[in-house]
Image (cartoon, rainbow, N blue to C red):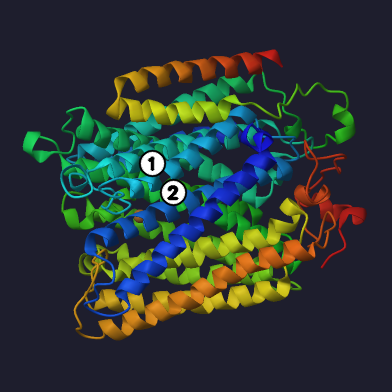
């Protein structure tokens, strides 16, 4: 088992332990139990994903004796250096929240802008 | 300019993160000086009370959300890919989105000052129903909530990016059990963020719904529950403390090992203790709520005490790393040792307030202010300066003046302790936090006078740091790849590193690839 899968599995187990301990000591206080239960469920989701994803993962970093020579010519994909959409997306998120509070028209325009940015970001990463 | 606004390179993003945190650090520091000016003498009316409330709210908010926590994330943005031998973060565009959400969050929070009712004025904890019904419920409070909401989302996205990067993009031979301790501490931080920050996102949204969309989550008049607010807030709030400390544990570990010229003592112990601290810290949130009488004090007290154990393990590791090393007291090392001293004091008062009987006595008093400033100011802030002096040559290709740096350290160290030691005694004499003035009883006038005097010395120390940057930039002495004789991969590439980080990658056969290969050991200081 790869180390990071173990990390998520043990985090989930820890969440479960603290949930049970908390329930045992303070079950009349439901808020805490619910919070811990939601958190443990979310960790379990991540852990299950990690277990499944591990089967197809070939990670250079896990090769104890691999050297840079061994992976020469391997296709690393293309790394982007610039994109205008992250900053536009962040601004749109701000205007979306301001719009929800103060102006439905602004909110609508900002939601459209958010969707446009997400679409362009998706298209950009699909290209490489 | 445009190339910076649209950059997705992790180094540029890291630099922008760090510069933004430095801007907010200066602003929050000026706010702190205003607080100390108001409190310098009893019955002072220099700053009106409603403005004072905004000042301490923005000081706490900025230091926590826009300085100490994001500095760790920004530094990780810069360092993690370099230390594991990757060309960039796993999701460069997501990374840029995190950065801009964070920058915009900080700006909108402070824009509250420009609104008619002023900025948010209910403390960084934003307790409901206070934040819903009383003074400070104007546009400025909305801006604060929007800012924190955006900052929380930004932090979660960064955490996803950091975990994915470290799991998948390590260079050949860089196994998980060979990555530097700083990277491990960032993994623990990131997983802790994923556990705790959704609660902050939810609670700020709920307050916004209460304020604008007719909700009553926290309004007892309509069956809402204010204690629910405290649960949701502190479920995030206590882990946040460790989000603001774990990265700095990593920084201190790297600095100490480099300047003691010894391998990190107890590598596995440091990793396990990081996760033990992260894990335990999600089980202690209601130690901030002992005095509500609505939580299980024995449970939260016991788990809080337990955190002292893995923290003690870390101290053993740091001292063990220095033990019989050939220690070089560079400025970065001085700040790291200063961190050990201050953080130990903060940890001891932390164990005290983890005990409900003591907490009932000192809750919401200056004793608590003393406690968390020793952990986050004397601790994290000193480690932040250790990081700045240590990695400045790598990031900017210029070494900071060591002479000025040592002046900076001593002013800060002496000033910090003169400022904050008296606060413990103020608290024991009953001075409440967040009040804009106090009567001339007991020794409060003397203690506050000393604290304000110390604040000036501390500020001179911080100012010397920025003078140092100007002086060093003007002198502009170029630095080699490995000016300190470091052992981790970032020192294998040029200062500053080229696009995509490495022209050639050294072989990685251990936790200290650069100390294995004689040619890359660097010129040394
Ligand atoms: Cu706490």
> Disc number at residue A35?
none
Q: Nearer the viewer, residue A73 or A54?
A: A73
Q: CA distance from mark 1 to mark 2?
A: 8 Å
Report crowding for label 2: few under 14, some 14 to 19, many 20 or more residues within 10 A (C-alpha): many
Q: Quadrant of residue B477?
A: bottom right
Q: Circle 2 is placed at which residue position?
A: B65
> Disc number at residue B148?
1
Q: Nearer the viewer, residue B188 or B316?
A: B188
Q: What residue is rendered at 88% in x and 29% in y?
A: A70
Report crowding for label 1: few under 14, some 14 to 19, many 20 or more residues within 10 A (C-alpha): many
Q: What residue is rendered at 28% in x and 62% in y?
A: B52
Indicate yes or no: mark 1 CB to ligand 1 under 8 Å.
Answer: no
Give x and y (percent) for residue B409: 60, 73
Q: What residue is rendered at 23% in x and 79% in y?
A: B429
Kindly check if marks 1 and 2 are in contact, taking CB atoms under 8 A apart as contact.
Answer: yes
Q: What residue is rendered at 59% in x and 37% in y?
A: B162
Q: Secondary structure at mark 2?
A: helix
Q: Secondary structure at mark 1?
A: helix
Q: Quadrant of ligand 1?
A: bottom left
**Relative to B473, does residue B429 appear above or below in the rendering?**
below
Q: Residue furthest left?
A: B221
Give x and y (percent) for residue B152: 42, 38
Q: Quadrant of residue A75?
A: top right
Q: Chain of mark 2?
A: B
- Tally of marks: 2
Q: Nearer the viewer, residue B77 or B356?
A: B77
Image quarter of the C terminus of chain B: bottom right
**Relative to B16, does residue B47 appear above or below in the rendering?**
below
């Amino acid at each position: 088992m790869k180390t990071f899968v173990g990390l998520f599995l043990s985090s989930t187990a820890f969440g479960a332990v603290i949930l049970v301990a908390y329930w045992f000591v303070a079950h009349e206080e439901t808020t805490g139990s619910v919070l811990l239960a939601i958190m443990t469920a979310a960790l379990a989701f991540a852990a299950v994903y990690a277990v499944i994803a591990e089967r197809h993962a070939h990670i250079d970093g896990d090769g104890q004796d691999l050297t840079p020579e061994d992976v020469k010519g391997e296709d690393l994909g293309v790394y982007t250096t610039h994109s205008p959409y992250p900053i536009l997306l962040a601004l749109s998120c701000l205007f979306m929240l301001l719009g929800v509070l103060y102006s439905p028209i602004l909110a609508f325009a900002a939601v459209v802008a958010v969707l446009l940015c997400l679409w362009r970001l998706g298209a950009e990463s699909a290209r490489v | 300019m445009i190339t910076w606004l649209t950059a997705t390179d992790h180094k540029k993003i890291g630099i922008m993160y760090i510069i933004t945190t430095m801007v907010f650090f200066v602003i929050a520091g000026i706010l702190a000086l205003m607080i100390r000016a108001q409190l310098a003498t009893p019955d002072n009316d220099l700053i009106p009370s409603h403005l004072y409330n905004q000042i301490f709210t923005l000081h706490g908010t900025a230091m926590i959300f826009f300085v100490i926590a994001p500095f760790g994330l920004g530094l990780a943005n810069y360092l993690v890919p370099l230390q594991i031998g990757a060309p960039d973060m796993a999701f460069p565009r997501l990374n840029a989105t995190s950065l801009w959400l964070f920058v915009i969050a900080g700006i909108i929070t402070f824009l509250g000052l420009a609104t008619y009712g002023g900025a948010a004025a209910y403390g960084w904890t934003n307790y409901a129903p206070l934040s819903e019904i009383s003074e400070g419920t104007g546009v400025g409070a909305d801006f604060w909530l929007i800012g924190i909401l955006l900052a929380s989302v930004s932090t979660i996205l960064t955490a996803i990016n950091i975990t994915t990067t470290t799991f998948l993009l390590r260079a050949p031979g860089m196994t998980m059990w060979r990555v530097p301790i700083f990277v491990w501490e960032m993994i623990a931080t990131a997983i802790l963020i994923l556990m705790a920050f959704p609660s902050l996102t939810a609670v700020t949204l709920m307050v916004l719904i209460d304020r604008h969309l007719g909700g009553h989550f926290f309004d007892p008049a309509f069956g809402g529950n204010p204690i629910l607010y405290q649960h949701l807030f502190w479920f995030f709030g206590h882990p946040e403390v460790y989000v603001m400390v774990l990265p700095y544990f990593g920084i201190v570990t790297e600095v100490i090992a480099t300047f003691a010229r010894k391998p990190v003592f107890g590598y596995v112990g440091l990793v396990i203790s990081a996760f033990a601290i992260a894990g335990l810290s999600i089980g202690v949130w209601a130690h901030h709520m002992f005095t509500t009488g609505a939580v299980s004090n024995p449970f939260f007290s016991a788990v809080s005490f337990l955190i002292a154990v893995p923290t003690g393990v870390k101290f053993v590791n740091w001292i063990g790393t220095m033990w019989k090393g050939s220690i070089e007291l560079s400025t970065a090392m001085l700040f790291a040792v200063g961190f050990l001293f201050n953080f130990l004091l903060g940890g001891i008062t932390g164990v005290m307030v983890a005990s409900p009987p003591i907490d009932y006595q000192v809750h919401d008093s200056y004793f608590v202010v003393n406690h968390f400033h020793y952990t986050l100011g004397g601790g994290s802030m000193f480690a932040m300066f250790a990081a700045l002096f240590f990695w400045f040559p790598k990031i900017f290709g210029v070494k900071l003046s060591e002479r000025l740096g040592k002046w900076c350290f001593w002013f800060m160290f002496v000033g910090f302790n003169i400022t904050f030691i008296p606060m413990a005694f103020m608290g024991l004499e009953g001075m409440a936090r967040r009040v804009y003035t106090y009567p001339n009883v007991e020794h409060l006038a003397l203690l506050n006078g000393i604290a304000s005097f110390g604040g000036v010395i501390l500020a001179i120390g911080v100012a010397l740091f920025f003078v140092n940057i100007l002086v060093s930039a003007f002198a502009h002495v170029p630095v080699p790849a490995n000016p300190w004789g470091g052992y981790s991969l970032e020192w294998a590439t040029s200062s500053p590193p080229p696009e995509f980080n490495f022209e050639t990658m050294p072989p990685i056969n251990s936790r200290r690839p650069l100390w294995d290969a004689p040619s890359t050991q660097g010129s040394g200081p």
